[in-house]
Image (tube, coloured by chain):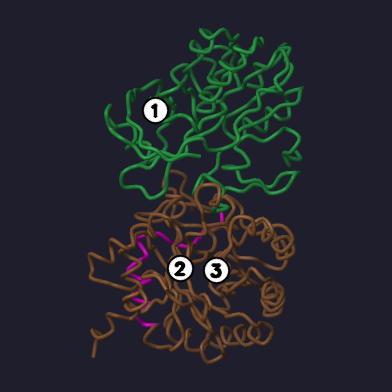
């Protein structure tokens, strides 16, 4: 983990209530797709944890949804604004387990971390497939960007206005995959956990105090003990999860 | 003795800055970020007899200039603290540590304190009778002077190290509780724990915290904490540790002027992991600006202005 001052380079709407922000600064603490950053906002005490969509030597890209006063304020930050950010938080995805045909499953703002993950897996010569779920066509983002990287992409929308009508699990039929990576709202993760046929790993979100394992604010129970979503997660293995239904 | 050093119940601290229990784990996460030997000491995560998961999530909510938590004393239990956490801490922290203890019965406080008292690394026992986030324990001992005295007496009977009673602000008269602890043999008191509070998600029309209520901490509570430290320092002869929303070197000085012999820093560690290190680094310059030679000379230094 590192603390640094980052400059907003871009902060633009991407879909209904969803923004993309690119920050310039030290990215050396970011080591794996699926990690997150924790941003201090003016007038807010707690930082806002947001997953990393992509990063390079000098920039970090995040995609965030307007969920309350904090993210509303964030969406109004102009280019040139500087922010105090903690980077390199959380364990991230383990690309070593992917096999030859990994499946990436993103629901809503669970989609962004799949971008850097797809990039790494494609660079390693894997055949990457992605299933993205949204409420309706106006909410869809990054399906084309993932396709441009070279992934095979299926989109599901709850109202059927784009792609398969239904949830991500309705779009899994017929796919042949070696391992899966999922990120999205908890009901989606539960459905994926029940439906997907291979081993996999799932990325969770929770309200956090610190974001680095000090406050025990985001702990969940697993088969391998209590896990702090911020530090022992946000990515947990399929076999650790305690869901029994 | 350096100009920052103070004495807490007979043990010299290099400086009065102490990360507060519940914001610093058992130290190892912070030892990865900086040399935690720069601290006066730190108070480790509230420890109970049995391992505890704590409350369901969400356990955290935002507030104006602060935060609410309802963690509910998640900890690995005293056996694991002695077998795993303390040996791990020994590698990165070479000063006496403050052992924070919680319980759901007098017997539990006694057993956990007795066991931690026997650990060479432990310098002080801080007995939490003020956790607002659990039922049937914690704060119920700290809101009644007779119960507070009973826990104090029972713990003192089985321990050799200084016993610090950590007090709740959720009472009518905190000085009365502090006096009851002093009369029962407490070596010091620390205050304040968090203020009972709540938030409601107006879109979903339900409390944000799964526990419904939680404890408010952060800069919002500093003036309340300062006032209570002032009142308690006036009411007891034992040392008072001041805490509650402290997040700068200036606020450390302010707490000490109100009567604090040492100062704990809590929520600030969560939003800035390097907060305590920065506060310690900034203390000499802040003292210079205020014309202070030695911090130990200013404890209770504003007392001449007591209301008559």
Q: Looking at the figure, which quarter contains the N terminus of chain B?
A: bottom left
Tags 3 and 2 on a common chain: yes
A40 w.r.t. B7: above or below: above
Task: Return the disc, 3 or 2, that comes first in the chain's sequence.
Answer: 2
Q: Which chain is green?
A: A
Give the residues drawn in magenta, as a range: B210-232
Q: Secondary structure at mark 3?
A: loop
Left or right of B249, for residue A34: right
Secondary structure that dominates the magenta span? helix
Membership of B226 in magenta stretch? yes
Q: Nearer the viewer, residue B261 or B233?
A: B261
Residue at the outermost front position: B1
Membership of A109 in magenta stretch? no
Q: Nearer the viewer, residue A89 or A70?
A: A89
Left or right of B137, for residue B250: left
**Residue under circle 3?**
B131
Give the number of the mark in front: 3 or 2.
2
Residue B289 appears at what percent x and percent y? 22, 64
Query: Which disc number belongs to residue B14?
Result: 2
Tags 3 and 1 on a common chain: no
Q: Which chain is brown?
A: B
User: Which residue corresponds to the image point at 45% horizontal and 82% vertical from the top-left?
Assistant: B239
**Residue under circle 1?**
A17
User: Which residue corresponds to the image point at 45% horizontal and 68% vertical from the top-left?
Assistant: B14
Give the number of the mark in front: 3 or 1.
3
Give the number of the mark in front: 2 or 1.
2
Q: Looking at the figure, which quarter contains the C terminus of chain B?
A: bottom left
A138 w.r.t. B250: above or below: above
Chain containing the residue with disc 3: B
Residue A243 appears at what percent x and percent y? 73, 40
Chain containing the residue with disc 2: B
Q: Secondary structure at mark 2?
A: loop
């Amino acid at each position: 983990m590192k603390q640094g001052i980052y400059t907003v380079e871009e902060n633009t709407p991407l879909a209904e209530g969803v923004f993309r922000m690119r920050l310039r600064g030290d990215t050396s603490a970011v080591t794996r797709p699926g990690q997150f950053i924790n941003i201090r906002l003016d007038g807010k005490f707690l930082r806002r944890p947001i997953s990393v969509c992509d990063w390079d030597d000098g920039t970090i890209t995040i995609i965030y949804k307007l969920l309350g006063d904090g993210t509303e304020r964030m969406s109004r930050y102009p280019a040139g604004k500087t922010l105090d950010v903690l980077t390199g938080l959380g364990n991230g995805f383990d690309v070593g387990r992917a096999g030859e045909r990994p499946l990436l499953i993103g629901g809503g703002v669970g989609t962004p971390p799949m971008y850097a993950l797809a990039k790494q897996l494609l660079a390693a010569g894997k055949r990457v497939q992605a299933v993205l779920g949204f409420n309706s066509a106006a909410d869809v983002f990054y399906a084309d960007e993932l396709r441009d990287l070279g992934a095979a992409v299926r989109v599901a929308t709850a109202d059927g206005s784009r792609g398969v009508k239904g949830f991500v699990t309705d779009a899994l039929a017929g796919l042949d995959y070696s391992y899966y990576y999922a990120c999205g709202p908890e009901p989606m993760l539960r459905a994926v956990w029940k439906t997907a046929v291979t081993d996999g790993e799932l990325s969770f979100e929770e309200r956090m105090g610190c974001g680095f394992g000090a406050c025990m604010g985001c702990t969940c129970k697993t088969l391998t003990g209590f896990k702090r979503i911020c530090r022992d997660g946000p990515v947990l293995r399929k076999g650790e999860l305690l869901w029994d239904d | 003795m350096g100009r920052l050093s103070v004495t807490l119940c007979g043990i010299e601290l290099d400086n009065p800055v102490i990360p507060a229990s519940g914001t610093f784990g058992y130290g190892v996460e912070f030892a990865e970020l900086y040399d935690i030997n720069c601290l006066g000491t730190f108070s480790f995560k509230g420890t109970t007899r049995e391992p505890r998961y704590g409350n369901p999530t969400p356990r955290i909510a935002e507030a104006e200039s602060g935060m609410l938590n309802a963690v509910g004393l998640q900890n690995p239990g005293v056996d694991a603290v002695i077998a795993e956490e303390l040996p791990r801490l020994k590698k990165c922290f070479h000063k006496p540590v403050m052992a924070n203890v919680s319980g759901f019965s007098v017997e539990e406080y006694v057993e956990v304190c007795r066991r931690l008292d026997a650990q060479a690394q432990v310098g002080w026992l801080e007995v939490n009778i003020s956790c607002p986030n659990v039922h049937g324990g914690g704060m119920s001992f700290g809101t009644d002077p007779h119960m507070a005295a009973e826990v104090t007496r029972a713990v003192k009977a089985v321990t050799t190290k200084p016993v610090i009673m950590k007090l709740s602000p959720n009472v009518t008269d905190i000085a009365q509780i502090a006096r009851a602890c002093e009369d029962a043999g407490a070596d010091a008191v620390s205050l304040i724990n968090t203020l009972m509070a709540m938030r409601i998600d107006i879109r979903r029309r339900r409390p944000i915290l799964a526990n419904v209520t939680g404890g408010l901490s952060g800069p919002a509570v500093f003036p309340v904490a300062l006032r209570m430290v002032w009142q308690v320092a006036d009411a007891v002869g034992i040392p008072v540790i001041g805490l509650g929303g402290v997040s700068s070197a200036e606020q450390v000085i302010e707490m000490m002027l109100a009567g604090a012999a040492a100062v704990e820093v809590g929520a600030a560690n969560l939003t800035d992991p390097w907060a305590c290190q920065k506060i310690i680094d900034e203390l000499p310059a802040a003292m210079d600006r205020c014309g202070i030679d030695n911090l130990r000379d200013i404890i209770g230094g504003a007392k001449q202005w007591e209301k008559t």
